Image: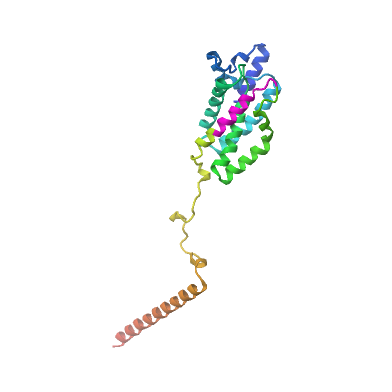
């Protein structure tokens, strides 16, 4: 996807064509095409680079750590952000992939909150450290910047993180090594409940084992004695 962004920008520069008309223009039917095309269009090289790097990082995290939901999450964030911008944003052309970037940051962050496992929490902390400065982008603080895309992208990421929180990745499933009989060893160095018993219980069990062993030895001697007597007769 990042490669396509660069190809579109190179095409824009080389052809000197105004691609801004393919952005999202709110509440105009012709502006709906921007829901699909706006993330591929950037105003200048700085704008393109500022979105390319986080897109590479965030989509890599998404695909590698959230494989089961990566494609639907990306698709819903992509479309939902554009549609929300079309519904509620200022009447101006909105371009750039920053809405998708904010959506992915938000998804990874809120997944750590909703899933509450170690891996998702660590990932949430990582994106918080890397992109903490992005929080300022969800308010109108700079002319010519579509803060609505940032805001609605963040909302889209939150919504999608909540939607898929119950879809557990294979690596997140807690496995009990004793639940699988094939993993059970043939014998143990100590009985498995050794440390669950009190000293008195262990002593009483040991005395019982001694008595059972003595009884077994006595019975075996009795059998051997009877066999020898029969043989002698």
Residue 219 in the image: above or below residue 179: below
Q: Tell me where residue 109 sits by quadrant.
A: top right
Compare residues 134 and 65 and report the one nearer the observer.
134
Residue found at the very far left of the displayed protein: 233
- The answer to if 155 sits in the magenta stretch is yes
Compare residues 60 and 231 and report the one nearer the observer.
60
Give the number of marks. Answer: 0
Q: Tell me where residue 36 sits by quadrant.
A: top right
Horizontal and vertical percent for residue 168?
Answer: 50, 41
Horizontal and vertical percent for residue 112?
Answer: 58, 41
- The answer to if 222 sits in the magenta stretch is no
Residue 225 in the image: above or below residue 20: below
Q: Tell me where residue 153 sits by quadrant.
A: top right
Horizontal and vertical percent for residue 107?
Answer: 57, 35
Q: Main secondary structure of the magenta part?
A: helix
In which quadrant of the rendered image does the N terminus lie?
Answer: top right
* Picture colour scheme: rainbow
Compare residues 188 and 220 and report the one nearer the observer.
188
Identify which residue is drawn at 65% across, 31% down: 54
Horizontal and vertical percent for residue 187?
Answer: 47, 64
Q: Which residues are magenta?
A: 143-158
Q: Is residue 187 visible?
A: yes
Residue 203 in the image: above or below residue 228: above
Q: Is residue 2 visible?
A: no
Residue 206 in the image: above or below residue 52: below
């Amino acid at each position: 996807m990042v490669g396509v962004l660069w190809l579109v920008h190179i095409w824009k520069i080389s052809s000197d064509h105004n691609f801004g008309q393919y952005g999202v223009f709110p509440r105009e039917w012709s502006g709906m095409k921007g829901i699909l095309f706006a993330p591929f269009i950037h105003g200048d090289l700085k704008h393109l680079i500022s979105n390319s790097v986080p897109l590479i990082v965030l989509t890599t995290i998404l695909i590698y750590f959230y494989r089961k939901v990566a494609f639907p999450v990306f698709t819903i964030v992509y479309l939902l952000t554009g549609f929300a911008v079309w519904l509620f944003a200022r009447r101006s052309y909105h371009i750039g992939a920053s809405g998708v970037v904010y959506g992915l940051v938000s998804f990874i962050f809120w997944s750590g909150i909703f899933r509450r496992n170690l891996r998702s929490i660590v990932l949430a902390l990582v994106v918080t450290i890397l992109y903490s400065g992005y929080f300022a982008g969800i308010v109108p603080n700079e002319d010519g910047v579509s803060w609505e895309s940032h805001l609605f992208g963040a909302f889209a990421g939150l919504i999608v993180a909540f939607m898929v929180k119950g879809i557990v990745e294979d690596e997140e499933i807690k496995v009990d090594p004793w639940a699988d009989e094939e993993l059970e060893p043939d014998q143990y160095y100590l009985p498995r409940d050794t440390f669950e018993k009190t000293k008195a219980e262990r002593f009483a069990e040991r005395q019982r084992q001694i008595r059972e062993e003595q009884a077994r030895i006595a019975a075996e001697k009795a059998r051997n004695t009877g066999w020898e007597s029969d043989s002698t007769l």
